[in-house]
Structures are given as structure tokens and as C-alpha cells.
Amino acid sequence: MPGGASPSRHPSGLTAWSKGLASYILRRLLINIPILFLVVTAVFFAFQLIPGDPAQMYAGEDAEPWEVEQIRRELGLDRPVLVQYSTYLSRLVRGDLGKSIYFREPVIESIKRRYWNTVKLALVSVSLATLLGLPLGVLSAIHRAKAVDHLISVVALLGISIPVFWLGLLLMYLFSVRLGLLPTAGMETLRSYVMPSISLSAFSMAFITRMGRSSMLETIQKEYVRTARAKGLPEPRVVVGHALRNALLPIITIVGLRFGYMLGGAVIIESVFAWPGMGRLFITAVRQRDIPLVQGVLLVFAASFTLVNLAVDLSYAYADPRIRY
């Protein structure tokens, strides 16, 4: 992405910038189509190697052989693998993700009921990680090699080292079993978000803290920061207005990536707290060998991660006006 001045306020300049941005977005989306295609292909053929009969699972253990064979024909499982693959791709192009073998409904319906539950949990978690991690990283950089810096470094190390499922179980035991303050499962109230979001955000908060410290330490050594201090500007203005703004680019990248990972990596936390999201749906689909549902969930995860990366790239222009698409 070449550097340049911010878009002109003149209508023609703004139009040219908008066209350039639209062209950039279109190119990025087209580039990611082969990636999604590889994801779909890898998942499809990987599940062909897993033992088990989806038709038998669909029919039930007590089904007669003729019933299982009839279901196998209805699902197209009696056809050659390449024919099944081409059929799946043709349906995918039309927006048809197939029918869930376990839930016996269109895959898109199963995903729609749970996708936004995972998105809401990921948004709360990444917001919590950023609101805590970024100030801690800045504070650690300002007080480098002092007691505050050492204390924050220890907290960040603990956040990175503690397994998320163990932290979730510990919080559940303390706040639900012992104190009875928070619900152990579900998402009916705002209190239901507390323990899952803390557990899911712990690693990201520690990572953002360390990245923020590193980025700020590099930025505050720059000449323009020393010049601002030499002019007698107040220290908060130097830190926030000059150093922090120019240290944001790597932090934005980390926040975006962590959000993408939370969308696909909330499987454990959703299982611990019985959160009705995509993670639990994925676990159920794998256990039941529900191939269409697994393929649909992974495709949605991959597409979501792609869109998050695109949003991160676009946000660079707001953090640094010199960047232009």
C-alpha cells in the first residue's frame, strides 16, 4: 500500500479516492476466493477419510438396512466422491450450504441462530482486552524498568500462560459455586457475559499489553517526540497526541487478528460455559460427523476472518493519514 497524502476535499479528489478504495476492496475479496476454495476442498476430502456412516447416524442405530440405504441415496452419499464434491461446489455457488444431517435442517439456518451469539461474545472480549491491555502497555512503556513495568509484565505473562479453559473453570468455581454471583451457563442476562468474556480476553489482553509496550517504547524514542517535549508540551499530550497515535498501527493489527481468532477460537469457552454459539455448534457437528454442517461452520469462520483482516487494513488509513489505498 503506497504512502501518500490524505484524499483531497475537492469533489474530484474524493471521488478518485472512493474509486481507489472500492477497487482495493474488490481486489482483496477476489484474492480471498481461492483461499476459501482451498478451505472447502481440504475439509471435504478430510472428512471422507474419517470412519463412520453419516447415513446411519441420520437414520438412527435401530434403522433397517434398507432405510439407511434410502437415506444414503437421498443425501447423495452413494455417488462417487468427485461427483459429491462437484455437487457441493455447485450448491455453494448458489448460497446453499446443504442440509445438516444431525439437526435435519438447512445448514444456513443452524448457523444463523448461533453466529451472532459468537460475534457478540467476541466483540465484548476484544473490547475488554483492548480497554485493559492498551493502557497497561502504555503505562508499562512510560515507566520502563520501574516497579510498575515489572508488575504489568508479570500480569501479562500470567495472561499468556494460563489456559483459557482452566481460567474459565476457576472463575466458575469462585463466582458461581462459592459466591453465587454469576450464572454458570447461557446468555440470558448481561451477567452471563462476565466470565466467558474475561476468560476469552485474558490471552488477548496480555498480548496487546506486550505489543503496546513494545510499540510505545519504539515510538517515544523518535525525534518528533523529543521535539514535542523540548517545546514544553504537557507529558499527557506528548504521550497521547504524538507517541500513542503513531504507535497504533501494530496494535490495530493485533486487535483485528485477536478478534478474528476469537470468532474461530471460542470453541473451548463456549463449551465450558454452555454458550449457544458457533463453537458449540462446531463441536456437535464433529461429534455427529455432520459433514455439511462442519463444512458450513468452517467456511463461515474463514470468511469472517477474511473480512476482519480487510477491516483492519482499511482502518490503517484512519490511524495514519499518510496511508492511501
Image (cartoon, rainbow, N blue to C red):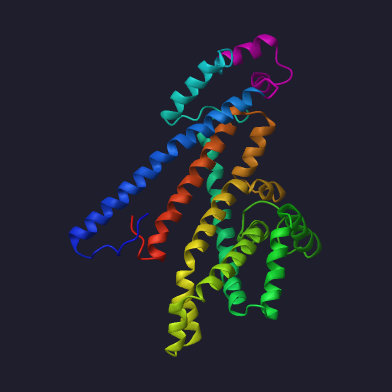
In percent of width and height, residue 152 lies at 67, 72
Q: Which residue does the image show at 58% across and 79% down from the upper left?
A: 142
- Residue at left offset 61%, top offset 72%: 136
Task: Identify the main secondary structure in magenta.
Answer: helix
* Rendered position, 288 above or below 13: above
In this orientation, does residue 153 appear? yes
In front: 268, or 61?
Answer: 268
Q: Residue furthest top?
A: 66
Depth check, front residue: 42 or 185: 42
User: Where does residue 65 sit, x and y in percent of width and height?
Assistant: 69, 10
Quarter of the rendering containing residue 15:
bottom left
**Picture quarter containing residue 127?**
bottom right
Magenta span includes 10: no
View extreme (right): residue? 178
Q: Quadrant of the C terminus?
A: bottom left
Number of labels in the image equals 0
Image position, residue 35 (x, y; %): 48, 37
Residue sitting at the far bottom = 232
- In the image, residue 88 above or below residue 282: above
Relative to the observer, which residue lies in front, 128 or 311? 311
In the image, residue 21 lies at what x, y percent?
31, 52
- In which quadrant of the rendered image does the N terminus lie? bottom left
Q: Is residue 233 visible?
A: no
Front residue of 255 and 88: 255
Residue 66 appears left or right of 301: right
> Viewed as shown, does residue 278 lie left or right of 176?
left
The region drawn magenta spans 50-73
Residue at horizontal 72%, vertical 49%? 272
